[in-house]
Amino acid sequence: MPTLIVAGARDGVLADANSIVLNRLIAHSRLAIVHDAGHAMMFQYPRELARLIDGFIGR
């Protein structure tokens, strides 16, 4: 199943290293790390997150 994994590089709760491991473990997954985002990425960068989701769904 195609899976989108999105992480914030400055997330103090869940390290983006966890997302890198998930990306390796889930076949056909796509990893996007938002470099200036923290744990509340959906509030910090809602447009960028929406673009990532739209791009993933549209492929």
Image: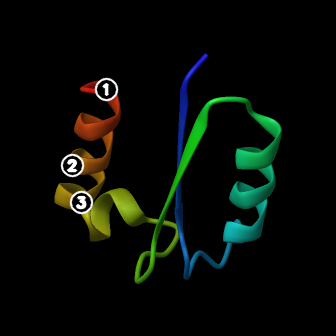
On screen, residue 57 above or below 24: above
In the image, is 47 to the left or to the right of 32? left
Task: Name the mark on residue 48.
Answer: 3
In the image, is 1 to the left or to the right of 47? right
Q: Secondary structure at mark 3?
A: helix
In the image, is 39 to the left or to the right of 36? right
Residue situated in front as seen by the camera: 12 or 33: 33
Could you tell me residue 58's position as x and y percent? 24, 26
Could you tell me residue 44's position as x and y percent? 29, 70
Task: Name the mark on residue 51.
Answer: 2
In the image, is 43 to the left or to the right of 9? left
Q: CA distance from mark 1 to mark 3?
A: 14 Å
Q: Secondary structure at mark 2?
A: helix
Q: Are marks 2 and 3 in contact (CB under 8 Å)?
A: yes
Image quarter in which the N terminus is found:
top right
Pointer 3 local density, CA inside 10 Å: few below 14, some 14–19, many at least 20: few
Could you tell me residue 38's position as x and y percent? 49, 75
The residue drawn where x is 52% and y is 68% is 39
Task: Name the mark on residue 57.
Answer: 1
Could you tell me residue 34's position as x and y percent? 42, 70
The residue drawn where x is 30% and y is 27% is 59
| Image depth: mark 1 or mark 3 in front | 1
The residue drawn where x is 70% and y is 65% is 14
Q: Quadrant of residue 40?
A: bottom left
